[in-house]
Image (cartoon, rainbow, N blue to C red):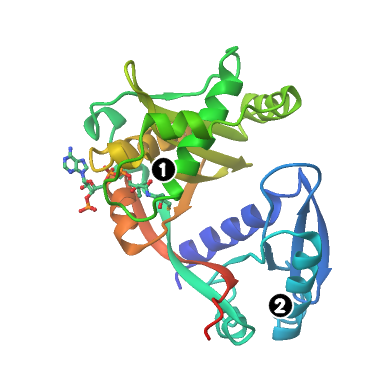
Amino acid sequence: MSLVHREVFERLEHFYDSVPRDVAHVEEYGGLVLFVRNGAGWPFYARPRPGAAEPPNAADVTAVRERQRALGIPEAFEWVHENHPDLLPVARSAGLAVLEAPLMVLDPDALPSAETLSDVPVRLADPGSPEFGRDVATQRAVAAIGFAAPGTALGDAGPVARDAAVVALTPRRVDEERAQAEIGRRAFALAETADEGALAGGMAMRVDDVAEIAGIATLPVARRRGLAAAVTAALARHLLDSGTGLVFLSAGSEEIARVYLRAGFRRLGTACIAEPAPVTA
Ligand SMILES: CC(C)(COP(=O)(O)OP(=O)(O)OC[C@H]1O[C@@H](n2cnc3c(N)ncnc32)[C@H](O)[C@@H]1OP(=O)(O)O)[C@@H](O)C(=O)NCCC(=O)NCCS
């Protein structure tokens, strides 16, 4: 591995360890840490413990899984393979199914403008706008409908399904999200038309000068028109323009990685995303 790549992997490691700490507390299990969210919201994963003397072992994985079950949260684990190459066989032997997702980093010189990728305009949610909370709820609804139809194929679900999936944020959550957006730690993007509303969306999380783009999704009815690539490019441009030095994401499959390739991202490594393997009869 080159020195440049080593340095990028170290920044990613710091990012993954930092991003949950504002809103979660940390429990340690040998070579693993489990982030347990304080209050309501999307539950976090467990990951390797920074500075651990020993790499995580199967007993650590089992201990975390017991705790996750007791807390009623998903038995989820995430790590960067290049930083923890020993964990993949350990996780599998401990009964986890591991998705090896392409880990991609933005090449700023290869970033196209969103307008060249799709004729549907993309806008960033404005934290100063009274519509901000509704925009965040809409981005989540688009993600809920999009991820419910995995893969990249067209489908039937569209604006009606999206509207039925909108869950309004409490005023307190809106204030929290707004505060994060105002200091540049969060960004939300929507591709929308005047007639149909939001058809695709995504968000970004930033810590210092590193940001991850996540939750990219397009309503099945609006797929294969360049919307996801445009949303990704718009978020990446916003992040670069606000001083982010390293923008990355993980793609759910090799097929989905092609979307991000067109938005200027290049494969650097592998993000491992693990959950319990299905039980076979
Ligand atoms: C993955 C996903 C976000 C892609 O959304 P999308 O808006 O359809 O993506 P794009 O339109 O940018 O690209 C998809 C395909 O359409 C093609 N395309 C883009 N614009 C096009 C156009 N104007 N005409 C014809 N085809 C076009 C792209 O070349 C790409 O083709 P490929 O699969 O052969 O590479 C969407 O399928 C989805 O929501 N999936 C479920 C959730 C998910 O997995 N999200 C990603 C997590 S990492």
In three-dimensional space, the C-alpha distance between marks 2 and 1, rounded to whole angstroms, equals 31 Å
The tag on residue 145 is none
Q: Are marks 2 and 1 in contact (CB under 8 Å)?
A: no
Q: Crowding at label 1, few (<14), some or many (≥20) Cα neighbours within 10 Å?
A: many
Within 10 Å of disc 2 (Cα), the crowding (few <14, some 14-19, many 20+) is many
**Disc 1 marks which residue?**
217
Coordinates of residue 112 in the picture (x, y in percent):
28, 37
Amino acid type of disc 1?
Ala
Give left or right: position of 174 versus 83: right
Residue found at x 66% / y 28% = 169
- The count of marks equals 2
Q: Indicate the secondary structure of the residue bearing disc 2.
A: helix
Q: Residue at x 35, y 34 (%)?
A: 158
Q: Is mark 1 within 8 Å of ligand 1?
A: yes
Which SS class for mark 1? Answer: strand
Name the amino acid, label 2: Val
Q: Observer-nearest residue: 25 or 223?
A: 223
Quarter where residue 51 is shown? bottom right
> With respect to residue 127, does 224 lie above or below?
below
Classify 19 as above or below 130: below
In the rendered image, which quarter is residue 44 located in? bottom right
**Residue 189 point in image, percent of width and height:** 46, 30
Residue in the image at 78% along x and 76% along y: 63
- Residue 89 in percent (x, y) is at 56, 85
Q: Nearer the viewer, residue 105 or 217?
A: 217
Residue 92 vs 220, above or below: the answer is below
Q: In the rendered image of this protein, does residue 68 appear above or below residue 213?
A: below
Residue under label 2, please give it.
61
| Residue 266 seen anywhere in this rendered image of the structure | yes
Which residue is nearer to you in this view: 15 or 217? Answer: 217
